[in-house]
Image: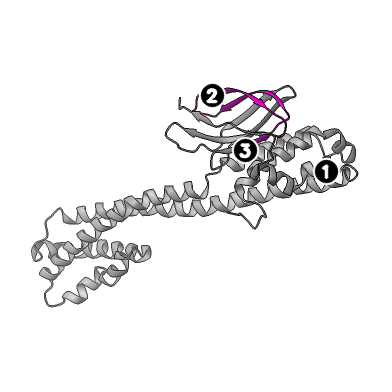
Amino acid sequence: MKKSGLPVSQGDLYLLLPLAWQAYTDHLPAFADYKSGYTAALATAQAQALAAAQALPDDTARSAQAEAVRAELLPQVSEYLAAWQRLDGYIEEAYPESYDAMRAAAGHDSYDAAAHYDWASLSTLMTAAATFGAANEAVLLAKGQMPATFLAALAAEAADVTTLLGRYQQLKGTAQQGTTAQQTANRALYDDYQKMNRDAQRIFRRQPDTARLFQTEYLLSLVSGTRQAGVRGTLTLADGTLLAGIGVAAKGPKGTVETVSDADGRYALALPAGDYTVVFSGAGYAPQELAVTVEAGVKKRVDGVLGKV
């Protein structure tokens, strides 16, 4: 799925950016000769910004948190509505001549909407019932056969609903804010890369083989196609749970190339032919180290299965 109108998916964006900025690092002298702002620190800052964007919970995670609370909330709403129905019975017993008016005062007009999870109506219902109970407790006890502990129990049910509803609404709001934050971060990452890419096309206009190393179409062919030279794979727990935000470092003859896994546990690194030590590491997980030989023009799949510590 594409985010913020970007021409690439979030997953592909997170895979192609390390390749683009690695190419930038490999050709840094040419960039530095063109503009003073092109420094090694810029590549480091971009890597940090990418890691921060990847660390944001994705839509699925945010929605899952809200839905988990909703799964607790709905049964609690049912418990409260059942308690309100008992209050309705006490009202009918205590006020046989004015039952309709009194049950309306206790919030009855909001009951059906509340039962269909209209949260504003539910709040209105709970407030009206609490106010009615406090104002009419003596009559409900004397004539309605209401147990002395009932209003306290009704208030407790309402308090549980209010707590869960507040958590649910906060998570829903946070989910929307988080989605917006991730979209904004993705847009900034993409725009910074494209600015660098445009300059790369200017710098290497007479060196097309070098210029293409920065082009979006070429980088997409590496992360999505079959021509990548290097390593790529998926990181999971032993039970198959996908691991996002795990550091991946390939230590080889020309130094270390790094990236992090995306929201689907995927990663990709463009590497020249040679022998490498690939290390997967992340907070809370035992590092995994693998010896890998990369052949020229070959995309080697190297998956990782990490264990928690």
The amino acid type found where label 1 is placed reads: Ala
**Mark 2 falls on what kind of element?**
loop
Q: Earlier in the sequence, mark 1 or mark 3?
A: 3
Q: Which residue is mark 2?
A: 287
Of the pair 35 and 145, the residue shown nearer to us: 35
Image coords of residue 39 (percent x, y): 81, 35
Residue at 53%, 42% (x, y): give it: 264
**Drawn side of residue 219 relative to residue 100, left or right:** right
**CA–CA distance in space, label 1 to label 3:** 26 Å
The amino acid type found where label 2 is placed reads: Pro
The answer to whether mark 2 and mark 1 are in CB contact below 8 A is: no
The answer to whether mark 3 and mark 2 are in CB contact below 8 A is: no
Q: Residues within 10 Å of mark 2 (few under 14, many from 20)?
A: some
Looking at the picture, does residue 291 appear above or below residue 200?
above
Magenta segment, which residues? 269-297
Residue at 74%, 46% (x, y): give it: 218
